[in-house]
Amino acid sequence: MKTIKIFMMNTTTLIGPFRQLLTMTRLPLKGAVSDDDLQVITEAGIIVSNGKIEAIGKFIDLKASADNVVIHELKGDHVCLPGFVDSHTHICFGGSRANDYAMRNAGKSYLEIAKAGGGIWDTVTQTRKASQEALEKHTVKLANRHLKNGVTTIEVKSGYGLSVAEELKMLNAIKGANEKVAADLISTCLAAHMLPKDYTGTHAAYLTEIATVLFPILKEEQLSHRIDAFVEESAFSAAQITPYFQKAKDMGFDITVHADQFSTSGSQVAVNFNAISADHLEASTEQEIALLAKSDVVATALPGASLGLGCGFTPARKLLDAGGALAIASDHNPGSAPMGDLLTQAAILGTFEKLSNAEVLAGITFRAAAALKLEDRGRIDVGLSADFIGFHTNNYQDILYYQGNLKPCMVWKNGRLVFDKHH
Ligand code: NIG
Ligand code: FE
């Protein structure tokens, strides 16, 4: 697959006909939605120009009215959706944690393995050993796998460096990877993933060092505008993280939180800081659900972490019914979520949590884009980025029905066909 980022020449292209095109427009950012709310255009076409969507409508109408347009005519049945957005991943890392997985299945818990020196710290050790080039190459590989699965925007966290120099190495690797892949990689600084085991000072001293030394470099070198932290007793408590997030906020960073994975308190922190998103939430109770639902924080379910750890899912149904905004992301990482298949995971979450097709698809398109504060994607509408995908079927319901086994056969990014299974 060719993955160099090039922007569309000044050609205008009409693509179609799609048996069904789901625009994902006219749906609210928050709350429950039913499939009746979906806008489905049949026998549809899309006109793209300069990487943006110029028009959508019936293919024959667009064909009749358009001159000077290159026509990319599709044969057979295709359903079109917006390109997927994966708003939470850790795909920049070294090594493997296959042994952690085996140990968990033999009865050890994620937190026990971490205490014994495995877990996140094991990946930190292996990531520190890897060169920036090797990390970049691995990130490119995983991002391209995502792209073939229809994910055209991918958030990528640091957090396996855990020192100023090693976090910079990771963020530079992510930046380098972004230049080599067709998907957009949105980087997030997760230096507050855990207190590094080789750090001799306190949690507070570590966080102060990161905030005073690393944050200004992130700004200056435009390495990330997003700050994340793992809020959990085994990582950083709500009290420890508060001054850190305050500094980040004062410097104009967007905040996102690993919240309520094993115990609650993270979602309260997210709401206090008006974070863009609070992610995980497997342990959230009615209280946290209510809190998040009335806030502007996007609640992000990470079913891949539930599947990787063998624990319960984020209460997605309850979050939606309470009026919350629900995104669904893969959390792809070598420890808790090794699978990395967003569509499969989202479909399975839908099965267990009784989510409509509209809710699952919203969670991996425009609601996930909102979790990254991106308003130019996640829907198919005039003026938005021409990021969309085609599936070989005539019924959009098949996409979740096959629980991720029906993969996209075509992926367009910024109006360019970047993956085509037929060729
Ligand atoms: O989102 N919970 C903390 N961080 C990651 C896991 C990282 C790892 O296990 O390497 C997560 O699940
Ligand atoms: Fe994560």
Image (cartoon, grey):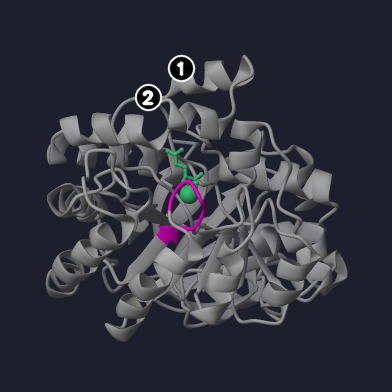
Question: Where residue 214 sits in the image (x, y, percent)?
Answer: 17, 64
| Front-lying residue, 297 or 181 | 297
Q: Amino acid at mark 1?
A: Asn
Residues 305 and 351: in front is: 305
Magenta run includes residue 230: yes
Give me the C-alpha separation between circle 1 and circle 2: 8 Å
Q: Which residue is mark 2?
A: 96
| Viewport quadrant of the C terminus | top left
Q: Nearer the viewer, mark 1 or mark 2?
A: 1
Q: Magenta stretch: residue 20 in it?
A: no
Task: Name the residue located 37 percent from the left edge and 44 percent from the top edge.
Answer: 143
From what the image shows, is residue 246 above or below residue 100? Answer: below
Residue in the image at 51% along x and 38% along y: 340
Task: Give, as a single range, the part of the protein colored magenta.
Answer: 229-235
For label 2, the SS is loop
For residue 257, say whether it is visible: yes
Q: 380 or 68, which is in the foreground?
A: 380
Q: Which mark is residue 155?
A: none
Dominant secondary structure, magenta? loop
CB under 8 Å between discs 1 and 2? yes
Q: In what element is the residue under mark 1?
A: helix
Q: How many marks?
A: 2
At label 2, the amino acid type is Ser
In this rendering, is residue 246 above or below 330?
below
Q: Which residue is disc 1 drawn over?
A: 99
Q: Position of residue 255 (x, y in %)?
A: 42, 72
